Amino acid sequence: MPPIRRSNLGRRTRNATNQANYRSNRTAQERDDGNERERIRISQTREARARHSTNNRASLNRAAFSYDVSIDYSNYQCVVIGSMNSVCSHCKALKYKNEANGLCCANGKVKLIPLDPPPEPLYSLVSGIGTDSIHFLTHIQQYNNCFQMTSFGATNVVRENFMPTFKIQGQIYHRAGSLLPVSDSDNKFLQIYFMGNSPQEIDLRCAHNNLTFYAPTIDEVAIVVVGENLESRDIVLHRRNDQLQRIKETHRSYDALQYPIIFWQGEDGYDFSTKMINPITGSETNKKVSSMNYYSYRLMIRENEDNHILKCRRLYHKYVVDMYVKIETERLTFIRLNQTKLRSEEYIHLRDAINTDGNAQNVGRMTILPATYIGSPRHMHEYAQDAMSYVRHYGTADLFITFTCNPQWIEIKQELFSGQSPIDRHDITARVFRQKLKSLMDFIVKHNVFGETRCWMYSVEWQKRGLPHAHILIWLVEKIRPNEVDAVISAEIPDVLVDPGLHEVVIKHMIHGPCGTLNQNSPCMMDGKCSKRYPRTLISETITGNDGYPLYRRRSTADNGKSTIVKLNQQDIEIDNRWIVPYSPILSKTFKAHINVESCHSVKSIKYICKYVTKGSDMAVIGIGAENSNDEVTQYQMGRYVSSNEAVWRIFSFPIHERHPSVVHLAVHLENGQRVYFTTQNAVQRAAQPPSTTLTSFFETCQNDDFAQTLLYSEMPKYYTWNQSSRRFIRRKQGKPVPGYTDVDLQYGMEIVPV
């Protein structure tokens, strides 16, 4: 039945008509009086908003130096991230209030067919309710193995103790093997489907790991995988009409072959041909849906929609790792396949080669894994150089903060399904930590709890247990004086009678170990000693250390210090201030997590932000043949680890590094020695007219601009912006006017790094 047509559609309402008649019949004096009243009302509203904002900021300005035990800072509006009750107007996804609009569906440009909930008894088995469901979810990976048609493999599947996450290192690949088993061995994986004996097939599936499950009720599809791991995998579908069809690893049937429990109907997965839609008209566009957009859409929680993927626990962990590696492989494959097209060479060599024989086929070397690829060695090296520019310009950082995700945050626990624990939902853990990290940075930078901030940077990493943590460096305008360190940072157990809330947080999150003679199996133990140098020495006053970090006050129980009792291996152990990790009372009480705060005056703190450059990779790199010694793509793939939480973080496109202010890279080269990027088609044109660099553009600007002649090369970005399209410097239009030059503005907070 068609909707009822509104009679007044497109016409003015009665109230709007009356208002228009009233305004048109007013006298000039009445119009002026009305405008003045409206101006006063708007002014008062703005003043009230500004006063409210100023009061909030004033109450937190340098609040870390005057911590008040009676204030519950965690209830401040700037800290509370709220519940997941914001609904996307396009796809009905549930989000937090400060999450990006395009996180779920790219602002309505992505629309996928919803997954049907599994039938009984599978629906009850993944619900987490009842003993059968608990048993099934505990062994869900083994059950999935009984029905999957390809095997899962990686260079190294990490299985360490205390690892509530799925983690792999190196390449991921899927194999099917031969269609018939070798002699004296049982049928397995794909071979089961070719036995031709249904009762025997069921027996073999049920015999796998001595578990019990029901036989599948859908038509099976067989595959054959051939080719090397580092190349594109060839997958052949064996259809019921005995026809063979060769497909790519990004074929839409690929996910269902590996995860039959999740895609119980054999639903389509990601495919290159999936197109975006116009969010207004709903029609398809020419733009394709990326694999990252696709899987980000699949991992969201939506109104009136049951996403059973999020209920599959360890199988869900494996799924997100597998799908992220597919996303990453897609990007790296593009880089690998296009390296023969884009070449680079010094301009003078390119010009000489073109002038000599006019042949550009053998000129230049193939480009490698670029710095624009996040996480690549070149990107990390570039990031370390940017960090060092802050040190050169502003001096050493004032605060070094390590912020670790707390899986027991109430925002995480309230979003769990029945029977789940936080380690089962890395999507919620990642999203909550992202919001908490943004709140922490706003708390420090915008609300100035340590004073006005000059610049900052942070880097997100992942623990062996899979939880994310951020290393943060803060530069302050007003430095922390030696007599103020104890007011900002504490390394002591607070008095439970004076501040019970902070006491609970410190006892739960800020005690190291215990390790040493109390626990030789602690992860921090190396060669029989604690690598973090605990237990520390008890001292009555804070003094300067030898490595740029203070030795914080740690009073003994005889000197009015506190102690507490903790359980270790079912034994009560007394812990005093020697085991306390330095913390800031205001941050610990606000965010209720492990937040290590150090007053640092050493450039070595940069190494924790960019550790893959300064101390070497933590990844286990296996041997690579001589023929691949210059293949950075292969080296990157073979050496990396990917955990479940990191995979979710990357799928949601959350940033791993952030900083402020921005850093401008300036080129430094000899005359005609700049690096030129070209293809075989435009090599002659590039040899005749090489693109400008920041250095050559600086010389050109100085010829035509009197003010530029007064500047050094490194000072240009303070007064000029670099236009990437026109490749020239343009005067800034915002900032502080320069005396004597009315049309020149100075922009503060911009650092320059010559490269």
Image (cartoon, rainbow, N blue to C red):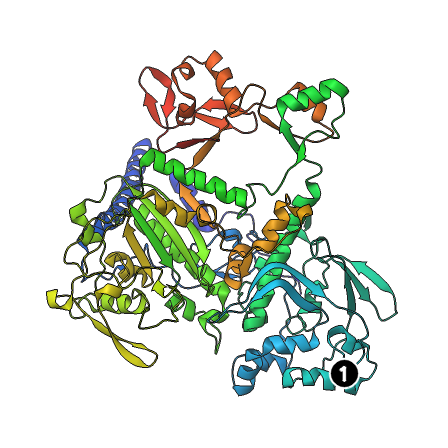
Badge 1 marks a residue whose secondary structure is: helix
Instruction: Using the image, determine if residue 416 lies above or below residue 376.
Output: below
Residue 216 located left or right of residue 13: right
Q: Residue at x 51, y 16 (%)?
A: 700
Q: Quadrant of the N terminus?
A: bottom right
Q: Which residue is mark 1?
A: 201
The answer to whether any part of residue 110 appears in the image is no
Which x, y percent locates residue 446? 31, 46
Picture layout, residue 34 above or below residue 403: above
Q: Is residue 672 left or right of residue 440?
A: right
Residue 755 visible within the image: yes
Q: Would residue 381 appear left or right of 183 to someone viewing this image?
A: left
Farthest left residue? Answer: 559
* The residue positioned farthest toward the front in the image shown: 527
Q: Residues within 10 Å of mark 1 (few under 14, many from 20)?
A: some
Task: Answer above or below: position of 130 versus 22.
Answer: below
Find residue 523 and report its image quarter.
Answer: bottom left
698 vs 131, nearest the viewer: 698
Percent position (x, y) of residue 561?
A: 15, 66
The type of residue carrying mark 1 is Glu
- The residue depicted at 30 percent of the width and 33 percent of the height is 32
